[in-house]
Amino acid sequence: MSKIEDSLTFILISVCLVFFTYTAMQNNAERIQEVLDDELAAKRDLYDSTVVARSLDITVKHDKNPTTNTIAVLLSASSSYDNEKDTMGYSWKQIDGQEVEFKEGSEKSVVNFNATEGNYSFELTITDSYGISCIDTHWVNVAPEPNSCPVVIIKGEIGKEKKKVVKKEKKKRRRR
């Protein structure tokens, strides 16, 4: 091969490598964009399902103690977000049901309290640092502690009589 052919071969190989590298990078970029789009869609699905799930139905757990009738309830808005990533403030307010006391206060993204049987409604106001607020209502329905009637089992047998048990006393023998 002549020097010109060697140079052309080198240039051709270099161009092919650049082309294949560019194509591979473009395919990777498309795959990365697909993954990002899927993650964004999953976040939107999570947000949509969270917004739709505005009611919580729970039952007081049977704890074998008839004097207890409460269940610990936790409501969380910690998955909420601001599109502009502004700082957010939270304010929970009970609007219906037997009054409950928030254990950690009502100005957090997560509140918890003890509830007895009944229906409760809570209003959550989220305000961003620009003063824009969104209000959502959440319902909690607490069913009573389940307790069923004891199961009665009666057995009977025909033709059998209860036998008397006779105890024989052991006589003590004295040694002389």
Image (cartoon, rainbow, N blue to C red):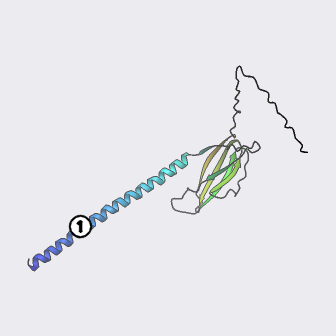
Which amino acid does the dot numbered 1 rest on? Answer: Phe
Q: Nearer the viewer, residue 144 or 130?
A: 144
Q: Residue at x 24, y 70 (%)?
A: 18
Q: Is residue 154 above or below residue 57?
A: above
Q: Residue at x 23, y 67 (%)?
A: 19
Q: Residue furthest bottom?
A: 3
- The quadrant of the image that shows the C terminus is top right
Q: Residue at x 48, y 52 (%)?
A: 44
Q: Position of residue 110 (x, y in %)?
A: 63, 56
Q: Is residue 149 above or below residue 112?
A: above
Q: Residue at x 37, y 57 (%)?
A: 34
Report the residue marked by disc 1: 19
Q: Residue furthest front?
A: 176
Query: In the rendered picture of this protein, how many numbered marks are placed on residues?
Result: 1
The kind of secondary structure element at disc 1 is helix
Tell me which corner region of the image, top left, top right, bottom left or bottom right, holds residue 69. Answer: top right
Q: Residue furthest right?
A: 176
Q: Is residue 109 above or below residue 139?
A: below
Q: Position of residue 125 (x, y in %)?
A: 62, 54
Q: Is residue 9 above or below residue 30?
A: below
Tell me which corner region of the image, top left, top right, bottom left or bottom right, holds residue 143. Answer: top right
Q: Position of residue 71 (x, y in %)?
A: 69, 47
- Give the crowd class for mark 1: few <14, some 14-19, many >=20 residues within 10 Å: few
Q: Nearer the viewer, residue 120 or 64?
A: 64
Q: Position of residue 147 (x, y in %)?
A: 70, 37
Q: Residue furthest top?
A: 159
Tell me which corner region of the image, top left, top right, bottom left or bottom right, holds residue 62. Answer: top right
Q: Nearer the viewer, residue 155 or 37?
A: 155
